[in-house]
Image (spheres, grey):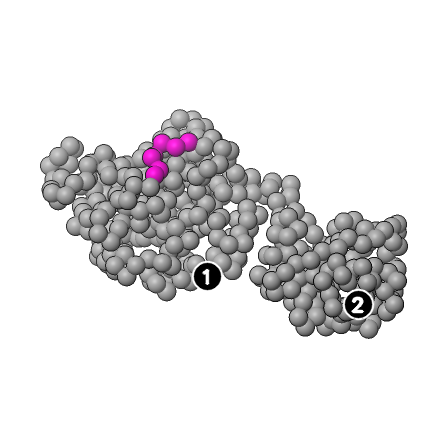
């Protein structure tokens, strides 16, 4: 049976960040393996750097050892974590076994007696750590192996996953060959990150950070035209099997007109169509005759929200989004959600992006979107767009490519669900 730590997610995150984005693997738990020095040393020897954590009623004390348990002299960094403060003290050098001796007199700077469940501190250490007495009684003790969150092994795994996703998307063929390219419409409030998402996808396939779509802070959004972005693959210069469609941002009073939504979905708007206040419908302009083909229409919609502000959407905006959802359901268009800026949430670091859906702040955001807007949790994906980076990051690439792959699969669901009379060869 797996042994679980006493650390809450929040406590573990604070410790990870404090030690510089470390991953903790639980090796020893006194309440399970026994309050015995021999048991601790037998289990934890030759494990590399370790973190020993003791749990008292009102604080956590952690001792970081920079090298293997074994022979020789040791330097240990001791930390005391209380609700609002963290103090630290470097102790040693001394023989390792000395630190497990009973030392009520405080002759050693820090020592821990497992059998008596007590940790002792010298006068100097007590003062440095801000303690009121020279000992702490504890209920349990755990030892963790400490590794870099983004070590070489993990980064190699991420690189392999990225290449697998790139291959899957490059070789993707829309369901039944009904269209050559999937059209994905990005919808969302002003500043949510629609244009940044397109730039990020293009950057990944070009092999370097690019900014084709303008990104800005215009009150009505930078996009005032309907844009259909084709993306060329830097590997062979061929266009990829999807088109990302961008439009004006949604807002309470200005932005994209709700009456335009059905026409966008049906494929009436050509690339670079200029939105205007006259509400003229573009039937018969450009290549369109009023009866767009299957290849012209939208096959999947992705709502784009900023993870930091999605919980603060106004009542008017929520109602507008729900109205669009009803239109999408009416048109049988599959829709998903992209949460951007996830890397800027509190306590989230680059290392967390590897297992981002397990992070408590992200789980809370997903649940908030589900409750407020009614989207299924399985249809909400988190991404980190390229906004200020100069170089591509494999971890960021994997999040973006994973979301893109899911959107292509969602478009397949739409195509598969089409009535037979709408799947003729004329749709190609």
Q: Residue at x 41, y 53 (%)?
A: 307
Separation of marks 2 and 1 at Cα, in angstroms = 40 Å
Question: In the figure, residue 24 lies in which quadrant?
Answer: bottom right
Question: In the figure, residue 330 lies in which quadrant?
Answer: bottom left
Instruction: Tell how many labels.
Output: 2
What is the x, y in percent for residue 75?
81, 51
What is the x, y in percent for residue 86?
66, 58
The reply, left or right, for residue 102 in relation to residue 158 is right
Question: In the figure, residue 268 lies in which quadrant?
Answer: top left
The reply, left or right, for residue 159 in relation to residue 300 is right
User: Secondary structure of the magenta portion, mostly?
Assistant: loop
Which residue, given by chain and number where applicable, does mark 2 sit on? 134
Q: Secondary structure at mark 1?
A: helix
CB contact under 8 Å: marks 2 and 1: no
Label number found at residue 150? none
Q: Residue at x 76, y 61 (%)?
A: 127
The reply, left or right, for residue 290 in relation to residue 9 is left
Neighbourhood count class around disc 2 (C-alpha, 10 Å): few under 14, some 14–19, many 20 upward? some
**Magenta residues, as a range?**
210-216
Q: Is residue 174 above or below residue 118?
A: above
Judging depth in this view, the residue of 407 and 380 nearest the camera is 380
Mark closer to the observer (2, 1): 2
Which residue, given by chain and number where applicable, does mark 1 sit on? 364
Q: Residue at x 70, y 61 (%)?
A: 80
Residue 381 lies within the magenta run? no
Q: Residue at x 21, y 44 (%)?
A: 264
Position of the C terminus, as image quadrant, is: top left
Q: Secondary structure at mark 2?
A: loop
Judging depth in this view, the residue of 14 and 391 nearest the camera is 14
């Amino acid at each position: 049976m797996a042994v679980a730590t006493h650390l809450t997610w929040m406590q573990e995150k604070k410790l990870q960040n404090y030690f510089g984005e470390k991953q903790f693997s639980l090796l020893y738990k006194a309440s399970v393996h026994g309050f015995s020095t021999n048991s601790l040393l037998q289990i934890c020897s030759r494990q590399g750097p370790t973190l020993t954590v003791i749990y008292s009623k009102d604080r956590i004390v952690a001792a970081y050892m920079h090298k293997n348990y074994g022979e020789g002299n040791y330097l240990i960094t001791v930390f005391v974590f209380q609700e609002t403060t963290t103090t630290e003290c470097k102790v040693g050098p001394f023989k390792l076994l000395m630190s497990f001796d009973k030392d009520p007199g405080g002759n050693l700077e820090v020592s821990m007696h497992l059998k008596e469940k007590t940790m002792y501190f010298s006068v100097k250490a007590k003062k440095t750590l801000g303690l009121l007495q020279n000992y702490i009684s504890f209920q349990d003790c755990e030892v963790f192996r400490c590794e870099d969150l983004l070590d070489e092994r993990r980064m190699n795994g991420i690189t392999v996953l990225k290449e697998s996703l790139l291959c899957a998307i490059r070789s993707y063929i829309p369901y039944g060959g009904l269209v050559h390219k999937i059209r994905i419409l990005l919808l969302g409030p002003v500043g949510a990150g629609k244009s940044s998402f397109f730039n990020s996808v293009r950057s990944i396939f070009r092999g370097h950070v690019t900014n084709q779509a303008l990104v800005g802070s215009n009150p009505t959004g930078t996009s005032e035209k309907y844009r259909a972005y084709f993306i060329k693959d830097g590997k062979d210069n061929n266009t990829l099997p999807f088109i990302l469609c961008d439009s004006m941002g949604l807002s309470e009073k200005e932005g994209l007109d709700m009456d335009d939504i059905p026409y966008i979905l049906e494929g009436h708007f050509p690339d670079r169509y200029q939105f205007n206040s006259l509400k003229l419908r573009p039937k018969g302009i450009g290549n369109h005759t009023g009866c767009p083909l299957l290849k012209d229409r939208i096959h999947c919609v992705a709502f784009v929200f900023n993870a930091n502000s999605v919980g603060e959407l106004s009542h008017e905006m929520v109602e507008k989004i729900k109205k669009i959802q009803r239109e999408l359901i009416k048109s049988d268009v599959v829709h998903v959600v992209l949460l951007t800026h996830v890397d800027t949430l509190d306590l989230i670091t680059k290392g967390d992006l590897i297992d981002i859906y397990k992070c408590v702040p992200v789980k809370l955001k997903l649940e908030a979107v589900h409750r407020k807007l009614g989207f299924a949790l399985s249809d909400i994906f988190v991404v980190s767009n390229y906004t200020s980076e100069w170089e591509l990051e494999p971890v960021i690439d994997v999040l973006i490519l994973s979301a893109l792959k899911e959107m292509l699969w969602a478009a397949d669901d739409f195509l598969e669900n089409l009535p037979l009379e709408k799947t003729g060869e004329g749709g190609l």
